[in-house]
Amino acid sequence: MRNRSGIQGVASSPAIVGAVTVLVVIVAVFLAYNANNGLPFVATYDLKALVPNANALVKGNEVRIGGSRVGVVRSVTPVEDPEGSGNFAAELDLKLDKSAEPIPANSTMIIRPKSPLGLKYLQIVPGDSQRGLEPGETIPAEQARPEPVDIDQFFDMFDEETRTAIKRNNAGFGNGFAGRGPQINAAFGSLRELAEHGQPILRTLVAPSTNFGGFWEALEDLSATVAPVAEQQASMFVGLDRTFAAFARVSRPFIQETIVKGPPTLESVTADLPALRPFLNHTGQFFAALQPGARALGRTSPTIAAALRAGIPALNRSPVLFAQLDPTAEALLDFQAEPGVFNGLELLTDLNKTLDPAISYIAPAQTTCNYLTLTFNQLASAFSRGNGKGNWLSAISFEAPDGPNAESTPSSAPANGPGVKNHLHYNPYPRTGQDGVCEAGNERYTPGKTVIGHAPELWGTTTTNEE
């Protein structure tokens, strides 16, 4: 009875009840205030993470894995890039539940929007590494993925200049489609045929052998390559805008007429090119055959230039020569009309026919072997020496060989020994230019053998002093 009375006494005390109520409220407020940072006296799995840009991520924002809340961001601190590049990154102090431990070492992270009002959270995508991150370890910045574009950032690109350009594009497209309804309907009608004919092409494109996926990967690499020159590309598009604006000023009637005349021109070219193909082939062969002549012309061009320079004075004086040719031609015509001219020409023709065999036999002796010139040169050399009283004849004396029928005594037969030197060598009819052979003067003495007629061996087919 005493104890129950004591409890009732405490419960009936307003001061004690008020004190307990205040204490409970204080504890509840404390717990509510620190709810985002985790409950006190609860074990946590603490990590750090580096991101290039925290982008409105603040203390108390959630950390999620697979959409479930596994912790909070305890603090966001700007730090200098550990690689010493001079740039700054954001270091996140993460306070995670023990249930999330361990997170694979190759996990990635991305900052995502939680609501349209700008609230963010950090999403961790676990990797497949067998090693887990130890408490206090840092997730490197290389594992931070690009931040998705928020809806406000998306609408921010539609600034005043962009909106004005869109209006101009809409007006241009509207003017382009205006009055072309039948053509557009015909184009839509052809889409079915295009789709039917395009199916084999699409099957070829998606076949594994074409590596169509590799094409897009290469295109992605190309885009990453040209990204640093985005400003230059923007300048290029500004220049293209000016260019197309200039085209627009001459679109009608000039470009319009060019487009209209394009199909007939294409039909004519399609019909004419097969006929032109043989001509083009022959032209290629012709120019190929001209190449040696062109190379030779390049080597002889200095000579040709000198000849042309030397020919200019002759051409300047040619009118005087041409003026003198007229009376000469008239005199020749008058001479031709004389009665005895034709008789003389006939007699000259008969003489040429009579002399032709002899000339054709004798002429090579001079034209091929130069014998007449050599004869006169030798005669001139024979009398070229002398004194004030006169010239004398140059001669060489030699002793004829001894023996029967020797050349130094009367003989009854050609010299034929018995000595080695007592042999006759005589060619009464040498070949002097016939068949390109100059036999006279090119025979050699054959010791111990009598040779009459053509030499058994020629020791040369040319003569000296042929000029």
Image (cartoon, rainbow, N blue to C red):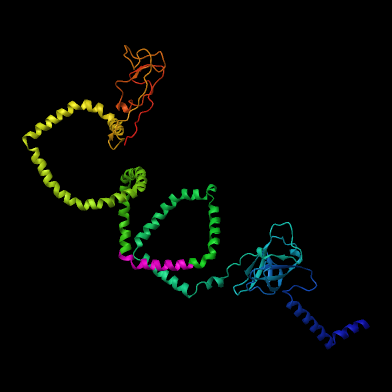
Question: Residue visible at 51% across and 68% down?
Answer: 231
For the magenta stretch, what is the residue range?
A: 234-253
User: Residue at position x 39%, y 66% from top?
Assistant: 244
| Res 392 seen here | yes
Q: Relative to 398, is 347 on the left or the right? A: left
Secondary structure character of the magenta stretch overall: helix
| Relative horizontal placement of residue 185, taking residue 17 as reference (left or right) | left
360 with respect to 345 (left or right)? right
Q: Is residue 394 magenta?
A: no
Image height of 7 relative to 328, above or below: below
* Residue found at x 19% / y 50%: 318
Considering depth in this image, is 376 or 63 the residue closer to the camera? 376
Camera-side residue of 58 and 381: 381
Q: Quadrant of residue 293?
A: top left
The N terminus - image quarter = bottom right
Among all residues in the image, which is located at the extreme left? 339
Pick the front one: 97 or 248: 248
Q: Position of residue 304 (x, y in %)?
A: 31, 48
